[in-house]
Image (cartoon, helix red, strand yellow):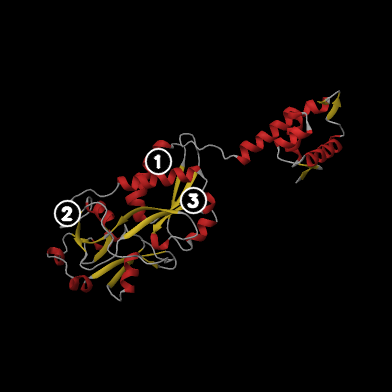
Amino acid sequence: MRFQRLDLNLLVALDALLAEKSVSQAADRICLSQSATSSALGRLREYFEDDLLVLKGRQMVLTPRGEELIEPVRAVLEKIRTTIAIAPPFDPATSDRSIAIAASDYATEVLLSAAVQKLSEEAPHMQFEILPLTDNLTEKLERGQMDLLITIDSAISSEHPSEFLFEDDYVVVGWDDNPALKQPLTREMFFDMEHVVVRFGKSRAPSHVEHYLNDQSLIRKEQIAAPSFISVAGFVIGSNRIATMHRRLARRLARVLPLKVMPVPIEIPSVRLSVQWSSASCNDPAIEWMVDHLRDIAKEKAPSGVVHDGIDWGGDRKQRGAGGGVRPGVFG
């Protein structure tokens, strides 16, 4: 590469020649042959129109022009080294980075709300943007339109790194004054009652539960398709409808809303959530810091052992089934 006729590759050779005042020693320093270094000196002399190094007695000495170049050349190379060759250190206490995270409202509620609060304490100047799950998430990750993606394992791309965060299973929620829920929920009742389901984006992508039930040819009476997991509660309260919801989210909502929480009377595989980032960000210390904290906070937020409405609000439960391979367009 040339800049105003100067081959910038020669700057490394020039720095070594000015420091060592010897062609052979400069050659050893920059791992070039003596003839190649001598050739570089010849081209430098031609460019600067100065000998730079001259023989005086038995030693090589710098010309006045050579002496003048020592500090500027060293400063230029140091600037390149510190700004390009070496990534600047990441200090969350002073960083003003903006991190964009794509996640469902479920993951936002049970993980990110607490995570961002804790991260903001350590990184008061950083900004966190939470983006909704939409179509073509992997493509957006690759284009840098988001930094992190939190989604179910079956929607994770194998072409980019990821890390498991937590596992969750499912419960049924309904209005606590729903007369049908005054008795244990049976399989027959589950399929006979009207349901609220969740679908995402322009493509109306199904949730993990809906995809699984469709695979098993199990058909629910879907009366309402809600745009988010949290909005489901408003469609079951005051009605006879029910919905299948993540255990962690149901636990949070039942604390403040008139919801009855019951076991699912059929087998539905647990859902596993992971965080993914672009392979281009593998050496980004800010992303590494974020992933480490999300993993640790996910463990801290695991439900404690509480029994409510016959539901064991225990910690991580054993997965009851496999989610299958990559299923683009399916959200947890």
Does residue 256 lie above or below 158 as drawn?
Answer: above
Please name the residue that numbered disc 1 is placed on: 119
Towards the viewer: 2 or 204: 2
Badge 1 crowding class, 10 Å Cα cut-off, few under 14, some 14 to 19, many 20 or more, is many
**Residue located 40% across and 65% down the image:** 330
Residue 66 sits in which quadrant?
Answer: top right
Q: Going from the N terminus, do you reach mark 1 or mark 2 first?
A: 1
> Which label belongs to residue 147?
3
Circle 2 SS class: strand
Residue at x 49%, y 34% (from the top left corner): 94
Q: In the drawing, does residue 24 fall left or right of residue 175?
A: right
The location of residue 179, given as percent across then percent down, is 14, 65
Q: Amino acid at mark 2?
A: His
Q: Specify the amino acid type for callout 3.
A: Asp
User: Can the viewer see residue 155?
Assistant: yes
Q: Looking at this view, is 43 or 329 the one in front?
A: 43
Q: Amino acid at mark 1?
A: Leu
Element type at marker 1? Answer: helix
Who comes first in sequence, dot 3 or dot 2?
Answer: 3
> Which numbered circle lies on residue 308?
2
Q: Position of residue 33 (x, y in %)?
A: 76, 41
Q: Position of residue 40 (x, y in %)?
A: 80, 40
The residue at the far front in this view is: 58
Distance in Å between CA atoms under marks 3 and 1: 16 Å
Residue at 74% of width from left, 29% of height from top?
A: 20
Q: What distance separates the C-alpha of mark 1 from that of mark 2?
A: 31 Å
Please tell me which residue is depicted at 86% across the width and 38% down the height of the picture.
46
Q: Is residue 25 left or right of residue 93?
A: right
**In the rendering, which numbered label is found on residue 234?**
none
